[in-house]
Amino acid sequence: MSKAKEALLAGVVLLVSRLRRKPRLKERERLVATAPPRPGWELVALILLLATAICAAAFIVVYALDRLPRETQLLGLSLGLAFVFLAAALIVTAKRLIVTEELEDDYPVIEHPDEQETVAQLVEESGDRLTRRRLFKVGLGAAGGAIGLALLAPVASLGPVIDMDPFYGTPWRRGRRLVDENGRPWRASDIEQDNFYTAFPQHADREELGSPLVLVRLAERELDLPADLAHFPARGIVAYSKICTHAGCAINLYRAPLFQPAEPKPALVCPCHYSTFDPATGGDVLFGPAGRKLPMLPIYVDALDELRAAGNFDGPVGPSWWGVRLRRPRTETSP
Amino acid sequence: MTRRTASTALALVATLAAAPAAAAPPLSDLAARGYHLYGQYCIACHGANGQGVLQPVPNRAGAGPGRAQEQQTALAPSLQGVGALSADFYLRTGYMPLREVGMQPRRSRVLFDEGQIRALIAYVASLGRGPPIPQPHPERRNLSEGMKLFTDHCAGCHQIVAEGGYLTGAIPPPLENATAVQIAEAVRIGPYVMPRFSKKSISDRELDSIVRYVQYTKHPDDRGGWAIGHLGPVPEGLIAWFLGATALVGICIVIGKRLKRE
């Protein structure tokens, strides 16, 4: 640990020493009046810059911890204070540390090619009061860098980059009953054609993404499932994840035609962006922005006419993530 | 209303003649009148004795008084067993006659008078055993239960204050003009692509609550002040921004003027 620290420190020192001050191009007549250094104000500015960096770092820490009480207020306070301190540091620098002079006329018109040099000289000489220039630069860099990092911190909320494992877990396993919102098991005879029903896993967390299902009964002749999904329905009842594969909204619209020959065919529709899925073909996308088909759950009817899961979904549940198509969901081992 | 081209009349006569005479049941006077009206306005699509036309049949006479009287494809569901409930709903909402086969039925001008509607309902009811016209009693039931049930079963498509919505391939209608009986009928029928709710899913008592809530949505209690079409936060936000931005621009102008004066 200490070795790593030393290496880091050595690296920083090396980097700073390389940013050596360029030698003045040539000695010229001063443009800016000389002024005595003000070490006291310099210290104030440096402390303010340090406070900026600390506040910005505090923002990152609070954001990363994600479990403090009054987190929102702390986030606002830390980022707000960072900007207040930065503003104060800049004001102190401008008012107390940069040499200012009052001129009746403008600076004399500068001709090429000395122009750039003159501007550089002006800047250089304006900073004459600063006795610890390099430290000042480091302070500014630290403040700016910390604020920049703080502003980038929310990017981490876009999701995990490495560990996608939690996304694949669902509470479904063979034998688990399908229950309604009151915890009553769904019976096959409850599920009528041209209507749709919501189901949850019995004795499991309903808030999990993989929990809610939408149940639909179709006429056996309407089903047109691919071979690997052919055994998924039970008595014409098909079960799909209720969570849209586009943005994770709950699918709560069902298109149930009264007279199929002249009307649109049955479809599950998400109310958010109108992704439309075909319940007859295994949840294929018929329309809308969804990129994957709706995950289907294999079910069977037990001796008591109750619906039970026969396994897990045929694909990952919910909105897409990196590598979503590479793996199949697994059953969580927790009770 | 009775003006038809000679060819249409001919086609209708031919179709009526083709109907098997033996299938005609003994009809009441009202139903007998409905039988003739059915022959005039409905048979082209729904077929003889309401048996339906389940495969597209080209070049049948158009249906509907004074509507699209051109030749068009016939395709319509069977009316046997749909009962007085369906006939009452489709005729009194103006859903039938349909302008064109395959289009979504919309609430439109009712083209039959009261006597004709009664006659047609009596005839359709005589085609098979079917549900009677429901008699909802919303005043007996509970508004908050109605709101909960409406949220669960209806609001996804019809929007929470029944302003209607949008679905891929269909338009769930607003319910502002739906009568209590029509709401009760629609829940049981599931017109067009609407799901159908049996008494097991929504009991008659629960349905009464839903009807009461839908009637409430016609004049809801707008706690926030302006209703802005009851369309929710987006138009409300738009208006807030519009007012807010106007106020800010006004303030800027005032500030700018003061500076100029000095």
Image (spheres, coloured by chain):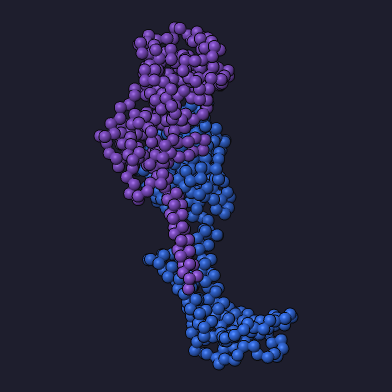
Chain colours: A blue, B purple
Residue at (40% x, 44% y) in the render: B230
Which residue is at the front of the view, B188 or B253?
Answer: B253
Residue at (37% x, 32% y) in the render: B178
How many numbered marks have been drawn onto this rendered protein structure?
0
Residue at (57% x, 89% y) in the render: A129
Q: Is residue A28 rendered to the left or right of residue B224?
A: right
Q: Is residue B235 rendered to the left or right of residue A104?
A: left
Which residue is at the front of the view, A180 or B75?
Answer: B75
Residue at the farthest front position? B261
Which residue is at the front of the view, A290 or B185?
Answer: B185
Residue B72: where, in percent of width, then height? 56, 21
Residue at the farthest left position? B140
The image shows residue A321, relative to residue B168, as above or below, that is below
The answer to whether residue A44 is visible is: yes
Residue B5: where, in percent of width, then height? 54, 14
Residue at (44% x, 55% y) in the render: B243
Residue at the farthest right position? A113
The answer to whether residue A236 is visible is: no
Residue A181: where, in percent of width, then height? 36, 43
The image shows residue B165, relative to residue A11, as above or below, that is above
Residue A139: where, in percent of width, then height? 54, 80
The image shows residue A319, relative to residue A217, as above or below, that is below
